Image (cartoon, grey):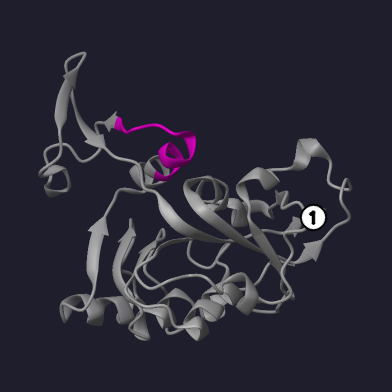
Amino acid sequence: MIDKLRSSVRDALADIHDGATVMIGGFGGAGQPAELIDGLIAHGARDLVIVNNNAGNGDTGLAALLKNGQVRKIICSFPRQADSHVFDALYRAGKLELELVPQGSLAERIRAAGAGIGGFFTPTGYGTDLAKGKETREIDGRMYVFESPIHADFALIKAEQGDRWGNLTYRKTARNFGPIMAMAAKVSIASVHEVLELGSIDPEHVITPGLFVQRLVQVPRTATGPAGFKAAA
């Protein structure tokens, strides 16, 4: 019998190793798997490469992971904002590497990994420092930059509902990077608020098929999310 449900966050994250590349879903607080991030902090894996849209807010969630010294490099599109003081201090001190990727290119590089595509050409970034060292090509009179896929060892994502086979649904904008990250990682771990009986999710409503999910863990719904963001009802 296929049953991907784990009894605890600790169990779900047990084999994340030092030096792993870990994708973490979320757009700011929306869709950020806060309980999985806290579990990764408690787990203690170090020298991690983190792939995320941003670089943390305040002192909780992803920012807390950075502050704990567990991250060697972050690949993201939006590292700095008013409350990104943890990232800012680490980066200025030379304790954290940054690979800055335009948001659309970040999403497409992750999607390309999941789709088995060897890379793609985009006009975004051409003529800037972001294109240095990369292949360029003229296509129909316009210059393009070659971008390679981003693969990961693990993906930590937040979903709304799931079943024991790992089929997932999401809530509104909490969906963001989760579906493509699940496809791009060797092991995808999802937190869900509700575990439903097998067959009770309409196949037309499944966003991430269980094929792309190796483990899921049920977490309670909280009143507030990471960095004080209002949690979805």
User: Dot 1, crowdedness within 10 Å: few (<14), some or many (≥20)?
Assistant: many
Front-lying residue, 82 or 69: 69
User: What x and y, as percent, mark residue 179?
Assistant: 57, 47
List the single residue furthest toward the top: 140
Q: What residue appears at the point 25 percent right and 56 percent down from the top-left corner?
A: 100
Residue 94, above or below 206: below
* Point 12% across, 48% down: residue: 129
In this view, which residue lies farthest toward the front?
1
> In the picture provided, is 183 more to the left or to the right than 143?
right
| Identity of the residue drawn at 66% across and 52% down | 172
x, y percent for residue 28: 48, 65
Q: State which region is magenta.
A: 110-120
Q: Is residue 172 left or right of residue 49?
A: right
Residue 8 visible to the viewer: yes
Query: Which image quarter: residue 132?
Result: top left
Question: Could you tell me if residue 25 is visible in this image?
Answer: no
Tell me residue 92's x, y (percent): 17, 78
Q: Residue at x 56, y 63 (%)?
A: 30
Q: Is residue 113 magenta?
A: yes
Residue hosting label 1: 163
The local secondary structure at tag 1 comes to loop
Q: Is residue 84 left or right of residue 197?
A: left
Quarter of the image with the C terminus is bottom right
Q: Amino acid at mark 1?
A: Asp
Q: Please count the marks in the image.
A: 1
Q: Position of residue 211 (x, y in %)?
A: 65, 44
Q: Is residue 231 magenta?
A: no
